[in-house]
Image (cartoon, rainbow, N blue to C red):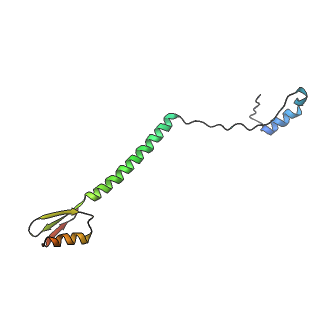
Amino acid sequence: MVIESASQSAAEVFHNLDRVSLTESGAHVEIRRPALSFRAVDPAVLVATIGAVGSCLTALMTGLLQINSTRKGQRLTVELASGNRIEVPADIPPEELRALVESLNETPQRIILP
């Protein structure tokens, strides 16, 4: 039998029942803590949350990869006195660019940045 009271605590209910002398009638009264109960998450909410988090992570990774590829895709254009042009990656170290221009035996007229 389960006895619940909205106005009294469990100890008060136990004390009131103990006064009635239930032991003479063969009844036994004890206080137990209720088993832990939890409310399950609605599967639709769970699926929607996982989908949203997955979409956010996908967008973040795509953005990072796109930033990296555009940085690598930028090129410098070196115009030489003869009218020729050389395109090199924008992240080329200055020493390599200097060595490349010197190997052509020409002086650059201008360097066009991206």
Residue toward you, 7 or 11: 11
> Residue 22, how many percent across, how many down?
87, 29
Q: Which residue sits at x=85%, y=34%?
A: 16
Query: Residue 91: horizontal and vertical position, in percent?
Result: 27, 64
Picture layout, residue 111 above or below residue 61: below
Question: Where in the figure is residue 44, as x and y percent of width and height?
Answer: 49, 34
Q: Quadrant of the N terminus?
A: top right
From what the image shows, is residue 4 above or below residue 82?
above
Q: Which quadrant, please, contains the C terminus?
A: bottom left
Residue at (44%, 40%) from the top-left corner?
Answer: 51
Say which quarter of the image contains residue 98. Answer: bottom left
Please tell me which residue is depicted at 60% across the width and 36% down the height of the picture: 39
Residue 88 lies in what quarter of the image?
Answer: bottom left
Image point (79%, 37%), residue name: 31
Q: Is residue 17 left or right of residue 2?
A: right
Q: Answer with left or right where residue 39 lies relative to residue 12.
A: left
Relative to residue 96, is residue 3 drawn left or right?
right
Q: Is residue 1 above or below residue 91?
A: above
